Amino acid sequence: MKHLLQKVRRSHLRLLFAFVFTLACTSKTIPSQIPLQDARNADIITTNTHLPLPKFSSLSEWEQRKAFLRNQILVSAGLSPLPNKAPLHSQIFDKLETKDYTIEKVLIETLPGFYLGGNLYRPRNGAAKHPAILNPHGHWTYGRLENTPVFSGPSLGISLSRQGYVVFAYDMLGYNDTVQLPHRFGNAEQRLWSFGPLGLQLWNSIRALDFLASLDDVDPAQLGATGASGGATQVFLLTAVDDRIQFASPVNMVSAIMQGGDLCENAPGLRLGTSNVEIAAMFAPKPMLLVSATGDWTHNVPKEEFPAIQRIYDLYGKADQLGVVQFKADHNFNQESREAVYRFFSKHHPQLTAPGELHEHDISVPMLQEMLALSKHPLPQNALDADGVFSLWKSLASSQNQQNQAPDFLRSRLRQTLAVQLPRDVIVERHGDQIVLSRESKKDRVPGLWFDGKGNPAIVINPDRSSAADQTEIVRQLKKDGRSVFLLDAFQTGIAKAPRPGDFGVSPPSKPGEDEEESADAAAGYPKFLTFNVSINAARVQDILTAVAYASRDHQQIDIYANGDACIWATFAAAVSDVPLSLHLGNAPSIESDADYLKHFNVPGILRAGGITTANQLLKSSPGIQ
C-alpha cells in the first residue's frame, strides 16, 4: 500500500508538473501575443512617420542607450571605425578685410584627394584665442553663400565674427566648391560599403572640426555648431559622435514627425528604432537651443519634442541648459532665428559680446566670386573624380578590416550592421507541428514546423520553404534519430512571404554605378526605406537567431543545417550568436565580388563590416562554433 501511495503521489506530481508546464506555455501562446502580421511588413516606418518620443527612467539607462546609438550612427555612416586622419593640407587664402572682421577662402583635404571648400570668418578684436563655431548649411540654392530673407550664410558668419567667434562655414557635397561628387549619389553596390552622402558629409564635419580646432586663434575647448534644415541634421549628428562640440543650436529640424527628406540626411540603419529627437538629445547635458517654426515640421517642438529632450537633461540635473524658441514663419534660418541663436550663445559666453552686436547691422555681403574658393583657384592635381572617391573609400575600409582583428569589436559592429539582437525571451505559439515565434517588443512572426524529439535540437533552413526541407534526406535522418527538429521559414520565405510596401526585395532594381536619383528604386524612396526598416537578408539572420534562442532554451548546443543562400544567412547568424552552434552547410554559393553580395546577401554596410571574411574569422575565434 505504501508503495502504491508513492506511485500515486508521483503520478499526481507528474500531472501537476505537466499542468504547470502547459499553463506556462499557454501563457506564452495566447494568439493576441503574436501579431497576425509581421511588423516588419505591416509597420513600415518612413521619414514622415510620427515616431515615439524617448523616455528613460535613469541616467544609467540613458547612458547605455546613448553609447548604443553612437555606434549605430557611426556604423550606418560607414565610419566604424573612423578612417585614419590624414593631413588636411589646409589652404587659407584671398583674405577680405574690414575694420572688425575678415573673410577667407578655405580648401581642406578631408580624405586623400577629396577636398572640402568653405569660408573662414574671423574677428579683429585683438584677442589671442576665440571660441569657434562650425556652420554647415541647408539645402538652399547657393548653399553656404545663400543671401536671401530666408537664409543668409554671410550675414550669420559676419555677425558671429563681430561677436568674437571664429566661424567656419563649409559646403554640403555638390555645392559651391565641393564638387568632386554630386549632392545626391548612391547605388546598391555603394550601399554595401556604407558609401553615401550622409557618411561622407559627417566625415567632412569631423575634419572641419579638426581644421577649426587647429587654428592658432581658436580655443579648442570652446567649439560650437549651428545650422538649419539639412545643416541642423549635420549639427546633431556631429554632436552625437564628437564630444568636442560644447554648445550647439540645430535650427528648424529636430522633429518627431519628419526626419529629413534628402539622401544626405538618410543612410541605411541610421534611424532603426530611433529618431532625430533622440539623436539630438545625445548632446545633453551641454547647452543647446532648439529653434522651431510654426510653418514647418517643427511646429510641435515647444509642446512635444522640447519637453521630451528636457526630461533627458533632467537626468543630469541640467534642464536649464536646454532652450527653445519658436517663430511664426515658414521653414527658414532668417534674421529673427539667427538673432535668437546669437542671444543663446551669448548667455554661455557673457564676457564675449556687447549687447549691441546681438542684432545684425551694417552687413555688406561680398560678391559670390569673392567668396568661392575655386574662383580662379583650381582643385589640386590629386583631386579624385566620383569613381576615384568610391575606390578610395573601399580601399581604406578594406585596409581597416584587415588590420582590426579584435573579435569583440568585429562582432559588435557586425551585429549593428545586421541590426540583430540576441533575444532572451521568445514568445511561442504551437498548433500541432506548426510553430510561430516572436520577439515580443518587435512584434515579428517567425513561422515553421517543429517536431519534438530528444537531444540537441536541429534547425533546418531551406532558402525557399520549410515544407521543401521536410522532404530531404537530412530531415528524415534527424527524425529517425529522434532529434527535435525546427524547419524554419525565414523572413519572406515559404509561409512567411507577404507584401512589404516600399521594399524591392533582396536585390532592388539599381545597377552598380547607376545614379540613385535616376534609378527606379530612388523614385520610390528605397534608400530612405532602408534608413528606418531592415533589409530582407538582415531580417533572415535575425529569424535564425530567434529560432536559436527558442531551440536552445534547455540545451547548450544547436545544430544548424542549411543549403543554398541559407548557408550565408546561417553563417552570419552563427558569427554573431552567443549560443554554441554547429553548422552543416550544403551547396553554399561563392561570395567574393560585390556582385555576389548583391545577388546572394544584399545587406547595406555588410562589406564595410568585413563581409563573409569577418564572419568566418569570428567563427574560428568562437570555441563553441563548429
Image (cartoon, helix red, strand yellow):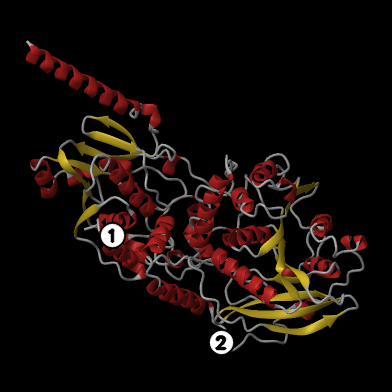
Would residue 212 appear left or right of 74 to someone viewing this image?
right
Q: Nearer the viewer, mark 1 or mark 2?
A: 1
Can you give x and y, in whole percent of width and height, for residue 10 in the image? 15, 20
- Quadrant position of the N terminus in the picture: top left
**Above or below for 147 versus 338:** below
- Distance from disc 1 to disc 2, alpha carbons, whole Å, reads 44 Å
Residues at circles 1 and 2 in contact by the CB criterion of under 8 Å: no
Residue at left offset 76%, top offset 50%: 330
Residue at left offset 34%, top offset 60%: 601
Mark yes or no: residue 67 visible: yes
Can you give x and y, in whole percent of width and height, for residue 449 in the image? 23, 38
Q: Earlier in the sequence, mark 1 or mark 2?
A: 2
Q: Which numbered disc covers residue 382?
A: 2
Would residue 98 appear left or right of 315 to someone viewing this image?
right
Would residue 229 appear left or right of 368 to someone viewing this image?
left
Residue type at tag 2: Asn
- The total number of labels drawn is 2
Residue at left offset 47%, top offset 58%: 521
Can you give x and y, in whole percent of width and height, for residue 191 in the image? 45, 64
Q: Which residue is mark 1?
A: 622
Q: Which structural element holds mark 1?
A: loop
Q: Which structural element holds mark 2?
A: loop
Would residue 545 appear left or right of 126 to someone viewing this image?
left
Mark yes or no: residue 292 visible: no
